[in-house]
Amino acid sequence: MAKKTATKKTAKKKTAKRVYFFGNGKAEANAKMKELLGGKGANLAEMSRLGVPVPPGFTISTQTCHDFNKLGQKWPRGLKVEVEKNVAKLERAMKAKFGDPKKPLLVSVRSGAAVSMPGMMDTVLNLGLNDDVVAGIIKKTGNPRFAYDIYRRFIDMFGDVVMGCHHEKFEHAIDAAKKKAKVANDNELSADQLKAVVDDYKKIYKKEIGKMFPQNPIDQLTLAVNAVFGSWDIPRAVKYRKLNDITGLLGTAVNVQAMVFGNMGDDCSTGVCFTRNPSTGKKEFYGEYLINAQGEDVVAGIRTPLDLKHLKKDMPKAYKELTALMTRLEKHYKDMQDMEFTVQEGVLYILQTRNGKRTAEAAVQIAVDMVKEKVIKQSDAVMRVTPKQLDRLLHPHFDAKATRNVITTGLPASPGAAVGQVVFDADTAEQWRDKGKKTILVRIETSPEDIGGMDAAVGILTQRGGMTSHAAVVARGMGKCCVAGCGDMTINYKAKKFTVGGKTVKAGDWISLDGSLGQVILGQVPTVEPKLAGSFGQFLKMCDKFRTLGVRTNADTPGDSKRARDFGAEGIGLTRTEHMFFEGERIWPVREMILAADDYAALLTGLADTRDKKEAAALKKQYGGAKKQFEGALKKLLPYQRKDFVGIFKAMAGLPVTVRLLDPPLHEFLPQEEKNQKEMAKRLKISPKVVKEQVEALHEFNPMLGHRGCRLAITYPAIYRMQVRAIMEAALQVKKSGKKVLPEIMIPLVGSIEELAIIKADVIDEIEQVFKAKKAKMPYMIGTMIEVPRAALTADEVATEAEFFSFGTNDLTQMTMGFSRDDAGKFLGEYVKQGIYAVDPFQALDQSGVGKLVEVGIQLGRTTRPKLKIGICGEHGGEPSSIEFCHKAGMNYVSCSPFRVPIARLAAAQAAIKNK
Amino acid sequence: MAKKTATKKTAKKKTAKRVYFFGNGKAEANAKMKELLGGKGANLAEMSRLGVPVPPGFTISTQTCHDFNKLGQKWPRGLKVEVEKNVAKLERAMKAKFGDPKKPLLVSVRSGAAVSMPGMMDTVLNLGLNDDVVAGIIKKTGNPRFAYDIYRRFIDMFGDVVMGCHHEKFEHAIDAAKKKAKVANDNELSADQLKAVVDDYKKIYKKEIGKMFPQNPIDQLTLAVNAVFGSWDIPRAVKYRKLNDITGLLGTAVNVQAMVFGNMGDDCSTGVCFTRNPSTGKKEFYGEYLINAQGEDVVAGIRTPLDLKHLKKDMPKAYKELTALMTRLEKHYKDMQDMEFTVQEGVLYILQTRNGKRTAEAAVQIAVDMVKEKVIKQSDAVMRVTPKQLDRLLHPHFDAKATRNVITTGLPASPGAAVGQVVFDADTAEQWRDKGKKTILVRIETSPEDIGGMDAAVGILTQRGGMTSHAAVVARGMGKCCVAGCGDMTINYKAKKFTVGGKTVKAGDWISLDGSLGQVILGQVPTVEPKLAGSFGQFLKMCDKFRTLGVRTNADTPGDSKRARDFGAEGIGLTRTEHMFFEGERIWPVREMILAADDYAALLTGLADTRDKKEAAALKKQYGGAKKQFEGALKKLLPYQRKDFVGIFKAMAGLPVTVRLLDPPLHEFLPQEEKNQKEMAKRLKISPKVVKEQVEALHEFNPMLGHRGCRLAITYPAIYRMQVRAIMEAALQVKKSGKKVLPEIMIPLVGSIEELAIIKADVIDEIEQVFKAKKAKMPYMIGTMIEVPRAALTADEVATEAEFFSFGTNDLTQMTMGFSRDDAGKFLGEYVKQGIYAVDPFQALDQSGVGKLVEVGIQLGRTTRPKLKIGICGEHGGEPSSIEFCHKAGMNYVSCSPFRVPIARLAAAQAAIKNK
């Protein structure tokens, strides 16, 4: 019995339906069968059901495409019979026959996957034409011009798309014919001239393909279906899917549909229309058409199409029908529709309708308007705009019509568009800026010493480094365009030039950077400034109603803080204090401090080891100078830091501000180049040898895993004490001025509870001293970054001391995956290409690996403190898929660079809606 | 009701017994109360119960010490009353009284914690003496010499130990007296002379302490108890506990015991004895004694004591009683006893008995013998020898009696003792070795280029690097003494000298290294070669009966493999193939390969990206040279590698051999110094610029997290293919010769299942090619290292491809804790000192952090493959506490360097017994 059932099932599977018919107000499928029939196929079926005047036809399923490609480009068993049956049905519906000179059936063959991939797949029109049919059409219509025109178009398209004979070859022939006839446009050629073109085309076909042009329509159809199925795996299709993160599809469907003609005379036309303006989002009918033309003429841009509104005059009946259908279909699909139509001898046909592509601006406008019009719910509106679109709204972008001479492509490190003259060092960038020049700073990699130049330049281009390299992080913080990790570039600082792909670019040459695509373009591409319309704010407010995740910002200056607050940030999730150590004059006390660091540490260690007073006194005498120098340098830094914090606290009044104490290794503050070392020696009045020795002594093999973060505070407690003093003095000062301050002190790179406990005790001691001296108190929190895997694994312990967690997923990714973000550029590209990782883990959080540790950390942390406040402050905090992960993992907030705050608000809202 | 119970409990706690009496064949405590009364206290109680002639007394508990120190060095409530009651009881037992001139009670006051800490805590003897009592003793005994002698000893000891007045001060006074009396020894001084010494001592006491010497015995006792309790926290005690990993103790107990005297005349004596020879383990009575002396005279070594066998003649009765007791107590305690005894006027007293300290040799001998004698079970015997002792047996060590001029202390990176002349580079080490000289190679750090020199030197000393630095790992592999990470040393390669603590050592100077203690010693310290007696082998065979963990070795050469097999290794857990890339001539093809690597990768990437045949042909043309060079170089390496594997497979015939494919980043194979770069350019007939450029191109910021391990195989599949071919060709060749070969191919640094799947497919393909060509087949396994945290977190996925796991806990520790082993030396010392990590996590596995990941990895891995073979091949595989962890975590085997194999066998056996 059981066996019988199995046999039945197998049998059923073998005979699974592959072809679905539609037409005449009926259909074997519906809108829900997108996965099996593609968007277009499901839509045609649905429209047919809705009574929309769609030319009849049939759809071959995506499963068939999958089977076809799996079988090594062969038709699966049974397909042939099913196609033939449907052709017969179509012949009946159209009262026409394949190859019948009197009543010939002509069809279009189009691809259509479950997700729209415009231009990626191939289309063939007018299939069914052959010598006999053309002769029949001439006989029947008395319009040989029309007949030869569609025939020559068909041979061209079939040869190009189906058989791989390049379109240019045909183009040359018709150009020659036009030259010979002394006319400018195709439609000026006479019937005879077109007939000659047809003959030329057939010869070209024979020459290129090695076979005669096929005369049997069924052969034509078979080859065309094969071409559509085969095109699923051509490189540009694979690339498009990869670029757009399209995965999990079976293949494309094939839509075979009866042809209707917009080029049978002046009572014919063809066009595309949108139910709203896809550029601005304005509620108006929008579109264009051509009289006496086929669809591809509109798209190809050979003839200039007319604005849709003229159709009202040209073909009033068709126009009335069309606009009524547009209104009806938008209402039905609850989204702006992009439709293709043809008027054949005064009769309107709708060839296609789908949700229309739109600009970022239009997406926001339409979403907001449709809510106002009560067409969709707010939650639907929130889902209608992608975070990527929002991102584009926030940065200038290149004029879409401009041509681009792309010389190389790197990582899209910070979005936007930048045009400037190439400079190779930070100083020049600053000098040129002062002269009013726009520059692009080109570096092998950037370091904190380049900050001034990065600020001065309009864009940054680096040879090395990934999405979270110094250049990328700083640029995103500045909202500045950056392309990073262009590995195939060779930079020659000395000769002030770089070469790539055989091209050389010198200092002063103009280049343009597309930070959203990672493109490096020769010359000046015209840019378009972003317009933040009123609907932008309305849309984001709508988002805020849904999201449960808080959105904070990573900001190190009052300016950044203010900008982020304007973008809707609800506090600061990460203030990096090390940037404050580099600025202007401050670097000098920092360096004084570092020069005394070893002796100072020796003093502390010595004092901790002895109980002997005499020994202690001797130590103090020996290292007294170092102590004075170290602590003296910190005293000089204190007022700077305090001022920084006052500015930030004021900008963020009423909102929480998380300040991360010093994180980088000390050697980052010393000059690496000999020239700069000499300058430092001169300035500090010491021997260059001393500087060099200290640089060498502090050298680390793997600085990422070295003496940094809170490890510095274990060795030199005075540094964090100074910082904490600056924070609390600033907080009390701002509080005194009547503003609310919520300081959160964050200890970085914690790996064990004991480490945090020791430092926390120091921090509290210092705060109590400040309170005592200032005779004032205020609430504050002390928490930690979770960025070392061990901290996540022992988060239950860590939470006994930490009052909040902030996941530093940059470092956590580096350590969990064993990738140095500065070095991974060399192989990570290959990894993503080979599908080892679906995306660069520094762009989107690696949920199945790093994400597990995050989940473990949250779960363990909340075991100890059920209400533990948890956020993320790595770069992933501004990336939509990672934000959804944070939402699901139960975090309280994400924190990202100011320009990503709106994106985070949207992504958080979408995460909440998706996971309700 | 509940409240009442609580009150009762509190009350009970408050009045908990603090003082326990023993004597006259009775005791309030027993041997099991070690934690509360210390080893000595529990033992005295037990002996008393056993009827051993112990002088009576009482013990104040360790809890009291804890409370005392917690209360800021004050006696807890009720202690005074309890002590007074016990003093009264003791007075009754001894029929004597504190301060009674006629029948004075004299007591000893000694410390005694739960774990024996010899010399760490302080002892006071003859407490109770004062002017009146001394007068009384003189009156009663007519022996003023004796009376003044014990009085002056008491003042000295009390002043020194209890009051902190240095012993030297008293020593000066008695030296002066001896000079004055023209005698050499203390016991030659007359009664009057001693009386004068007593007066001098009192004056010294008054001058140093500022108070008169206390005359009231209860005051003396109170001060002495305070001193013992206080001594728990003095630096040398704290340091001893730290050095010996002694944690979790409450404090020390105080033992107050009636004094008996070995110095009351020639019918008195005092001595120590062992029930077996503590040096050799031989079953013989062993000990020494002094006639007419107190115990500290024996220990202090001022008079030369006599061998115990003389006591038979000197005091036949006491000797007979003593030896009977020795036999009885050893039988009772089932271990070799270390006893202190005193004969007072012909009567034997046992002052103390405890399990005796013994040398490593003795420990093994005694364990083996006691099993033969059926005194203990085999499992007990296994627990009697510590892994540290076994380690000492395997390496030469310094003569314990030699003085050491220690100039600095680094990390005990590889045990043993080495004496040699300092050299600063590998070449010199080799040249001097060839001249028959013994050298110590001193380097800032070592690199693979130093291997030859490391092999030539007898010991290695480095300034940088931790327990798993290159120097440490290689040295342990070679069984060579190494001290690493001497951070306070400054090496000047140019001047060929190093300085430390103001001392300068030049090339050619003799130094000695103690690799077990990390000491660097000036001059030549005499060494003692290890004796691996027959009992050593018997003992390890006993261990093997208990352990369930397999023990393999990390070996890269046939020589190492053989040595490890002799030590009992059951296979190879890790063969590092990169060492084979460095040796001799092989480095040249390796470098040729690296020079062609970029273009070769460009070719592979290009070919993968295109389907266009013409484009592919163009690529092949462009990069054909690189392909030829890269693949040609690999072809040159193949026979070398094959030969290596043949040797190893032969040495390990019948046992599994795990071969790890290439792991380090390619830049490690290129010379970093300009001189060597020039040499390479010359040799390969290319421009030095090309070499320099490639070195720079391959530079990594964090090489530990860079392009290495299996990431190399993703970019350059040909490297692993060559290695796999070499392995399988070698395996088939050895198999053909009739030997069994069990190759296990291990892919390093895997982070994701996809990565492993791609490489595994390549490996299998190559193996199939070898099988086809050789017309032979054989079984093999393909597995992976788990060393990237992500691999552990996704081990369920990884196990779908991996046929075995081997935890690489060196890298796993680095990534999980965020420490670079090469850089952590700078701060890890401070971390261990401050108790943030109890031990260096590169020495012993961090069980609460890294261990969690190991457990997760094992659990997930076995979810997919329940019988998955799992081992460890990090340095922790030879460390006892880590081995116990591996046992508990359910691993199948540990793998360690050859010299640690016996230790691993022991540690694995102990782990099995402990966790039965």
Image (cartoon, coloured by chain):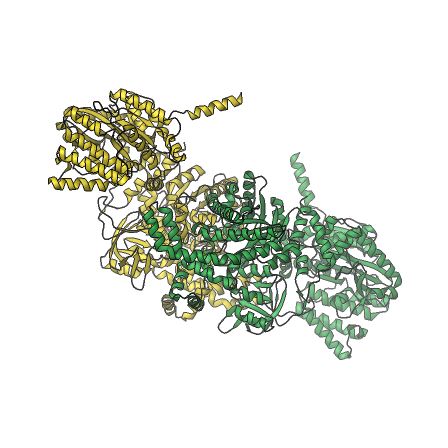
Chain colours: A green, B yellow
- Tally of numbered tags: 0
Q: Is residue A55 above or below residue B379?
A: below
Give the residue displayed 24% in from the left and 42% down from the top. B531
Which quadrant is home to the N terminus of chain A?
top right
Task: Compare residues B533 and B612 and report the one nearer the observer.
Answer: B533
Residue B117 image position (x, y, % from top left): 31, 36
Residue A482 image position (x, y, % from top left): 59, 63
The answer to whether one can see residue B467 in this image is: no
Q: Is residue B99 left or right of residue A74?
A: left
The answer to whether one can see residue A187 in this image is: yes
Task: Compare residues B210 and B665 and report the one nearer the observer.
Answer: B210
Q: Is residue A10 above or below residue A578?
A: above
Q: Residue furthest left?
A: B182
Residue A862: quadrant of the picture: top right
Residue A598 image position (x, y, % from top left): 39, 56
Q: Is residue B382 above or below residue B653?
A: above
Task: Compare residues A410 and B77 and report the one nearer the observer.
Answer: B77
Residue B73: quadrant of the picture: top left
Residue A36 image position (x, y, % from top left): 70, 50
Q: Is residue A848 left or right of residue B445?
A: right
Which quadrant is home to the C terminus of chain A?
top right
Task: Compare residues A551 and B444 and report the one nearer the observer.
Answer: A551
